[in-house]
Amino acid sequence: MADNPPAAQPSTGAAVRTGTGAEEAEVVAEDEVRREAEAEAEAGVEGLAPRTTKVVATRGGKWAEKNGNKRQRNQDGQEAKRRKLEDGDEGVSASPFSKEEIEAEGRKPKRKVAVMIGYAGSGYKGMQINAQEKTIEGDLFKAFVAAGAISKANADDPKKSSLVRCARTDKGVHAAGNVISLKLIVEEPDIVQKINENLPPQIRVWGLERTNGSFSCYQTCDSRWYEYLIPTYSFLPPHPQSFLGKKLVESAEKEGVFETYQSLQEDVASFWAETEEKYVKPILDELEPELREAVMATIHSSEEENPAPKQESVKVKSEATEELAEIKGEDGEEPIKTETGDTAQAAEDMNIDTRPPAEVKAEETAATIRSEANEDSAKIKSENTEESKSVLTPLEAAVKQVKAAYIVAKKAYRISSSRKQRVQEALDGYVGTKNFHNYTIQKTFSDPSAKRVIRSFKVRPEPVIVNDTEWLSLKVHGQSFMMHQIRKMVAMVALIVRCGSSTSIMQETYGPANISIPKAPSLGLLLERPVFDTYNQRAVTEYMREKIDFDKYEKEMNEFKQREIYDRLYREEERDHQFHAFFHHIDHFKTDYFLWITASGISAAKQSKSISRRDEQSDDEADINGEEG
């Protein structure tokens, strides 16, 4: 018998048949795959696990499979994404200094320190350093270099200084107290002053403390205190003619709980009727009957039914817009439809959440400002288009006046003690260890990390009045918070109170059902301070170091908080009316997306099996495994 021709070298993943030389061929195939996997592991793609080698037995022989288990690969991919979010875009950038400058500087000793800071987040894309965006840490790092606290040799890469943040905050979120830990050159006694001289007024370094060499402010932080400021008109019920207002009544009647619903709204039962009489009727009385009817129909129609004039159409990119956009489940379920069109299309034109004021001013906001300032409401001025110079129609002008009147009426509202007590009762439902998978993204009910501990959530007893608007302060103390968690917690409480809903719905949010909870504006959120009690005890007794204590800077912090955070917050809300816009659009958004808040509960709302893909990919939010912001 003629000799068989030499067997071809088996390719990766090809079957190696049994027969003459089968065992040797199997060994060759396995060795080849193993060598290739080892080579890939050595080459190492950053952030990805090396591919695994698996040999699968089949009837005819064995298959060498390079890629390993598909589920494992998916998990590895998710981990890589999470690591990327945690690490941020902190890659090496071009050094701002020449080789000669670096060599001339000389070497100085670096010490691990905890830096106590405060900042107003307006105009920044969050806390975490990102080479492509304006961030708090980015400005801090530049100030460290300028002050000589970081050497010129290390000015191109924050990782060289072992930079870690205690709590990472979202775009636009403020912090009266936060901590970062890193290695700094701190020999000069006035180093803090030098750093502050190189920072804008809205970012301050309160002080720094030497720590032990292995200190990480993120790992050693025991808990965090946050404050959320919210106008009390946020707890007013939806307008009776709004989509949500009608659904609340229909559902209460259908479920046989209408009397209970009325009793929960008793203290505000006359608000809208009095508003119509005092603020709206004088405007309508000046109009022709036909125009009067058209104005009110326009006011209470959904946004998609009532598009703004062409010159006033503004493409708004907001976090809640993304939440209300197309949502597809893992099984590919279709997006929820509105009564008048596709949810994604309707959401595109809506402004449900906060935006940096320089980015956009919605039509309603611009109208309110002009009306309250008694400016000429007959023209919309724009430097960019000729169309915007056209005269408003009588309908458009009247609609603007009525919208402005509603805002004035809301600002005049003062919350009752019973309603404030309802807010506190709802907040109490968060205390303890709960599964907050519905209050964040990329978390499932079965994910252990979705369980978080809330130690307290309190309403400040006395509201404050600023610019004729009454505000409530809500303070939450928790071990740690996930992305969006606090803002969703606040929005949930506001919806429960304003919609006269049972607090039992809150318990259902901790269960396996997926519930779509909107995010309250980031404008009102601020990190008050992190707590380091456990470390502080060891710092004194074992490390012979000072405590990380914000109390010694209390006077400066309070002045900064009032000037740079509170006053800024009040100014921005007075100008942009973000809370009004947030709740107004939820009330008028014609979909069953939020109808779980009605008496019919979860069964009344279609829920997606996964969070919005666009929301998951948000790049201006906090760490999905770490802090809120």
Image (cartoon, grey):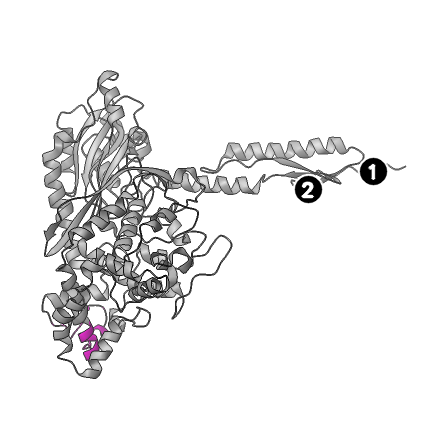
Lower sequence index among marks 1 and 2: 1
Name the image quarter holding residue 169.
top left
The rendered magenta stretch, by its main secondary structure, is classed as loop
Q: Residue at x 65, y 41 (%)?
A: 13
Pick the quarter of the image with the N terminus: top right
Q: What's the CA distance linking mark 1 and mark 2?
A: 20 Å
Quarter of the picture containing the C terminus is: top left
Where does the image place residue 422, in percent across and percent down from the top left?
A: 23, 50
Which image quadrant is residue 389 in?
A: bottom left
Which residue corresponds to the image point at 25% horizontal and 50% vertical from the top-left? Answer: 522
Mark in front: 1 vs 2: 2
The residue to which callout 2 is attached is 14
Q: Is residue 471 visible?
A: yes
In the image, the segment drawn in magenta is 376-399
Question: As shown in the figure, which amino acid type bears the numbered disc 2?
Answer: Ala
State the mark number for residue 4.
1
Amino acid carrying mark 1 in the image? Asn
- Horizontal placement of 543 versus 324: left or right? left
> Vertical placement of 294 versus 608: above or below?
below
Tell me, yes or no, if residue 629 can be seen here. Answer: no
Q: Position of residue 458 (x, y in %)?
A: 21, 42
